[in-house]
Amino acid sequence: MPVVNIARRLPGKTVSADVVSYNGLGAVENYIPVRSEATPIGLKTAYETMLAQRQKETELTALLKAAADASRQAEWNFHNAVLAMKESIRGQFGPDSDEAQSVGYKKKSEYKRGRRTPKTNAS
């Protein structure tokens, strides 16, 4: 017998089959369950609880997506503001200033100048 892992979600097909079975219980006469969770009232309670929890999950998923979108937008707004500040610092103090270096730019004088390589004549 396989080990049942209740940490995983049930497949949708299984839940759909369970709902069909639950709905089909109304056609069964003289049903006398031994286990309390298998009574029609217990089944109805479990079904309604499942529906309520699914609705709550859907709502929270929507809230999570909205929060993630808002967070992403705030990150971009902050990034664009920092880029504007850096360009403003570079424009006000110049590309070779200590102020430009303090906000993350490399000083213009620190870049190596390009060296020409002499052409070799193929004779």
Image: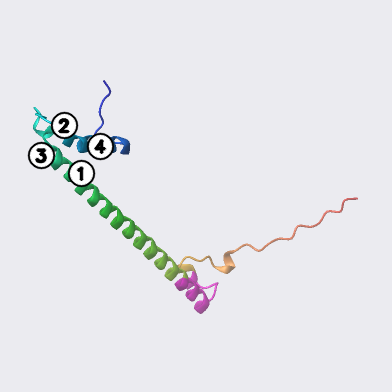
Residue type at numbered disc 1 = Met
Residue sitting at 86 percent across and 53 percent down? Answer: 121
Residue beneath label 4, please?
A: 20
Residue sitting at 27 percent across and 37 percent down? Answer: 15
Quadrant containing the N terminus is top left
Residue type at numbered disc 3 = Ile
Pair 3/2: label in front? 2
Q: Which residues are magenta?
A: 84-100
Which of the two labelled residues, at mark 1 and mark 3, occupies the earlier sequence position?
A: 3
Badge 4: residue crowd in 10 Å (few <14, some 14–19, many ≥20): few
Horizontal and vertical percent for residue 39? 10, 34
Q: Are marks 4 and 3 in contact (CB under 8 Å)?
A: no
From the viewer's side, name the closer residue of 117 and 34: 34
Pair 4/2: label in front? 2
Residue beneath label 1, please?
A: 50
Disc 3, SS = helix
Which of the two labelled residues, at mark 4 and mark 1, occupies the earlier sequence position?
A: 4
